[in-house]
Amino acid sequence: MAEVAPLPTFGIDVDRTQSVELVDVGRRRISGRYPIDPFGADPQLQDLLAPVVRLGVPVRVTGAAHLPRRGPALLVSNRGLGFLEPTALSVAVRQSVGRRLRIVGAPELPIVGDLLRKLGSVSAYPSDLGAALRAGHLAALPLGLTWLRTGGGVPPTEMLVAALGYPVLPVLVGPGGPFGLPFGPWRVVIGESLTVGNVGDRDPLAAAELAEAVRGAVHALG
Amino acid sequence: MRVLVTGMGGELGTRVAQRLEERRDVTEIAGCDYVPPRRRLRRSEFRRIDPRDRDKLAAFCEEFAPDAVAHVGIYEPGSRLPPKLAARYTQAATVAALGGAARAGRLERIALRSGINVYGRGRGRPSVPDENAPVAPTTPFGRTLLGVESLAAELGRRHDLPVTALRAATIAGSHMPSPLGRVLRLPAVPVPALADPVFQLVHADDAARAIVGALFTDYNGPLNVVGPGAASVWQAVRLGGRVPVPVAGPFWAVAAQAAELAGAPAPPHVIEVLSKGSAADGTHAVSVLGLAGVRSTHDVCVELYEWATVTPLRPDIDLAEVIRG
């Protein structure tokens, strides 16, 4: 795997969360000495907002042991539409292994797109997903726009080309309330990792194979 | 190895020549530019040639008969030349120098300076493109760079040579004449009113290391060379203690004019960096070229602001008295 040169983090790990003191945050904001990654993520801001988000979107995680504690991996979840599903998944990852999650699918809109990038979103391009994985991030990709569905949608084969050779984990995210309503903790089920192909492969057939495999695995979690 | 360095008079070209001089396997170094090198070079032969004098430039390159060419004669608009002249110089230097070098018949490889501007920026384009991302430049400088890459690649195909195009982020450093650096060092800097895009820089010395490294590999194709990490435009302004001036839409043209009046020309590719950002994935170059310890974008940005302010002295001042205090 490519060697990644270190970048200044000013005490904030680029991938793992840590406590953030308000005075320190304020001082760094004024002086401009805080890390930002090429995707636009602001780890300090993410860590600052994490406790608030965790209160707003409680989660109940099953299969947390499957989540890698370090290194790149791609979570493929069943649902992609809306803000709550990615947020619930992000809270689950932070709660289980203390890592920041990169949600794939930042909209190309002024203000909203920038804000979501600061909170860890990545644009939905194979190139961006590949770069995130090469940099060792834990990324999450929805199977498709599956509003009001629990199974997998259309597999994004063109995106999965970038994930060949990396661990891919199927994930089921759903509201934990009665009749599928978002009352109570969100339910997040994480499946076992599967890997297809080698890092750097650009084989569309292998990507299609991975898409089918992960779609089946997500469906099996339901 | 006999190496020809085009654009040897620039900061980057001079650094490339200095690094080549350190290598024992490089037996002869020759270079050309329209201005002399910025530092003393010990064993490089320099010829002052205007790139528009194509016959003279081509004859010099053919006569030297290089084994490898470091094509650094890419003139960034607003750096030392106005945009139109920069594009003409770049085009002329590419055609004449590469053509002349190839005609000599000894050429084995080409490494050329390009930029991540070739990917373009905006809707429908990845934020962090890798080398496989489609190229669709959105500024005149990006199109010039893509033209240079195409010419060199065509030459490489005809002569069966590996051509490494080093797509560098904005090259900066304390002594690098960079239009983006000049704009960021203004007392008041235009920033996007409704966004906070991120950009990447690469230090001139790291860019020079990458170009020299590419001369000693057989890699054929593009490589992104960027400083790890990134800086946002608002963050960079805070790092330098400058005053941010929020700008949106058509007012960017006004901001560009104002910056030019203040002594910092802001051509379209600089305005694009400020308004939309600029980044790429550079992990492949790190592994191919073995580039360890590349300075981060943040460090390069800090170095831009740490450059000592030049205080002009009055012509009638008595220097001896100043030194005595």
Image (cartoon, coloured by chain):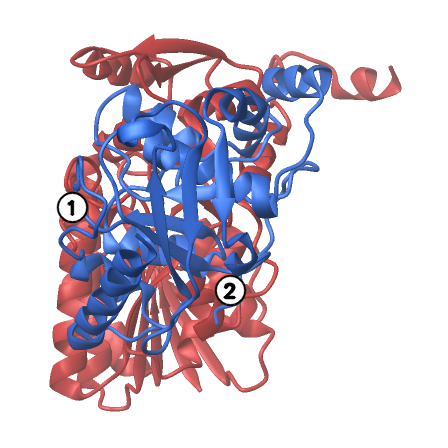
Q: Amino acid at mark 2?
A: Arg
The x, y position of residue A197, in whole percent, is 32, 78
Q: Is residue B235 left or right of residue A129?
A: right
> Which of the 4 quarters of the picture holds residue A145?
top left
Which shade of the palette goes to chain B?
Answer: red
Q: Is residue A209 visible?
A: yes
Mark linked to residue B199: none
Residue picked out by circle 1: B137
Q: Is residue B55 visible?
A: no
Residue under label 2, please give it: B209
Asked whether, in this view, residue A107 is left or right of residue A200, the answer is left
The reply, left or right, for residue B56 in relation to residue B17 is left
Q: Secondary structure at mark 1?
A: loop
Kind of residue at badge 1: Pro
Residue drawn where x is 37% and y is 14% of the image = B262
Residue B219: where, in percent of width, then height? 34, 79
